[in-house]
Image (cartoon, rainbow, N blue to C red):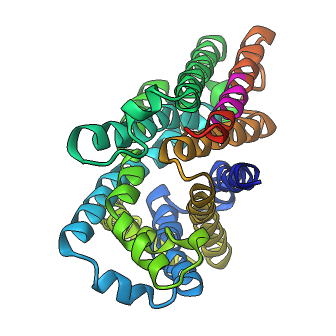
């Protein structure tokens, strides 16, 4: 039952992440940096504080009693992840939901799921959830196979994107993705994929806070919510600075007060997007508390996001006009990713 509920929570988190960009498409007349910043204030500041307040008693006291070294490293991982989050938004802007998330989150899944257990092997005395330990158990081996299968599915999705690039005219590509640009998109997606994995590292770095929260009586289901507050401070810092710089450079500060645009609706949709975005990690924390394996949780989370975002991409007609072969390729990639989810879930149930 633990495994089933863990997978369900990860599915809900993946659905939230795979869907969060949809409300941004309803924002009218604002520059990207303007609605990204408004949504981000909800993603990285307001909603994380609210979630921690509701689920972790005295969460600020836990933070203030956490050793400075833990807080600094957790915050730094958030800063690096914030850069990944910035380029992640750009990847969606240039590639669309389907291809952008597949490339970016493919790299994120690989780095985020494998580096922590390798780090424990090389730099800690821990004997739990290590890479060497995974290699020595049947469950761990199946989890690692699931990681490889997921990466294969991502490569197939990337191949489908390249086929789409070759088949469609510029007008056709931009009919569903206004700023489609394969070169810019792939570059920022790669940067995003590598740096976005730092969120998982931030959870690892801040584990002392979740342990303190449980010791003080917090429901283990919500133990990671206090960590998210600090990690997302880092994300807020990088995103806030960059968006303000873009507001200055592009002279888009007027967006926030431009009465020629639907200001209230724009703020509402941006806030909705930001709230949905945070829910991915709210449910991720719940899923990880059930499965108890960082590698399994991370790859499940990434796989569900890729699955949902590709389904949204199909629903939003991002693949309209492509050949049957290309459409079949993207569907194959989705099926392979679903298979990877089943493998990781099974491996975890055996005790990865």
Q: Can you tell which quarter of the image residue 306 is in?
A: top right
Q: Position of residue 291 (x, y in %)?
A: 61, 51
Q: Position of residue 113 (x, y in %)?
A: 45, 39
Along the viewing direction, whichever of 59 and 186 lies nearer the viewer: 59
Vertical position of residue 333 compared to residue 57: above or below: above
Left or right of 66 in this view: 343: right
Q: Position of residue 244 (x, y in %)?
A: 33, 67
Vertical position of residue 344 compared to residue 165: above or below: below
Chief secondary structure of the magenta portion: helix
Q: Position of residue 341 (x, y in %)?
A: 67, 34
Q: Residue at x 45, y 75 (%)?
A: 226
Q: Residue at x 64, y 56 (%)?
A: 20
Q: Quadrant of the C terminus?
A: top right
Left or right of 50 in this view: 325: right
Q: Residue at x 51, y 89 (%)?
A: 57
In the displayed orientation, state which residue is furthest to the top: 325
For the record, the magenta segment spans 336-344
């Amino acid at each position: 039952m633990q495994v089933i509920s863990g997978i369900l929570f990860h599915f809900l988190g993946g659905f939230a992440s795979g869907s969060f960009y949809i409300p941004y498409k309803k924002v009218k007349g604002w520059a990207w940096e303007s609605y990204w910043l408004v949504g981000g204030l909800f993603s990285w500041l307001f909603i994380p504080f609210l979630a921690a307040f509701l689920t972790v008693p005295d969460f600020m006291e836990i933070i203030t009693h956490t050793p400075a070294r833990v807080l600094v490293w957790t915050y730094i991982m958030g800063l690096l992840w914030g850069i990944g989050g910035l380029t992640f938004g750009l990847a969606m802007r240039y590639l669309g939901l389907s291809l952008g998330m597949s490339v970016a989150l493919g790299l994120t899944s690989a780095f985020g799921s494998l580096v922590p257990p390798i780090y424990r092997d090389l730099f800690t005395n821990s004997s739990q959830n290590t890479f060497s330990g995974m290699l020595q158990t049947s469950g761990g081996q199946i989890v690692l196979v699931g990681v490889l299968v997921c990466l294969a599915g991502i490569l197939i999705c990337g191949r489908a994107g390249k086929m789409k690039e070759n088949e469609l005219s510029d007008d056709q590509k931009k009919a569903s993705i206004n700023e489609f640009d394969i070169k810019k998109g792939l570059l920022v997606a790669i940067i995003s994929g590598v740096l976005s994995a730092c969120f998982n590292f931030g959870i690892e770095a801040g584990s002392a806070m979740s342990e303190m929260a449980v010791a003080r009586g917090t429901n283990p289901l919500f133990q990671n919510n206090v960590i998210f507050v600090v990690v997302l401070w880092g994300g807020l810092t990088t995103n806030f600075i960059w968006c303000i710089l873009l507001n200055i450079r592009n002279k888009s500060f007027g967006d926030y007060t431009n009465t020629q645009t639907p200001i209230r609706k724009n703020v509402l949709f941006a806030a909705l997007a930001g709230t949905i975005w945070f829910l991915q990690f709210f449910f991720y924390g719940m899923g990880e508390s059930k499965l108890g394996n960082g590698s399994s949780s991370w790859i499940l989370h990434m796989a569900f996001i890729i699955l949902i975002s590709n389904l949204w991409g199909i629903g939003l007609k991002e693949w309209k006009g492509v050949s049957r072969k290309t459409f079949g390729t993207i569907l194959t990639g989705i099926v392979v990713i679903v298979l990877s989810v089943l493998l990781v879930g099974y491996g975890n149930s055996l005790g990865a």
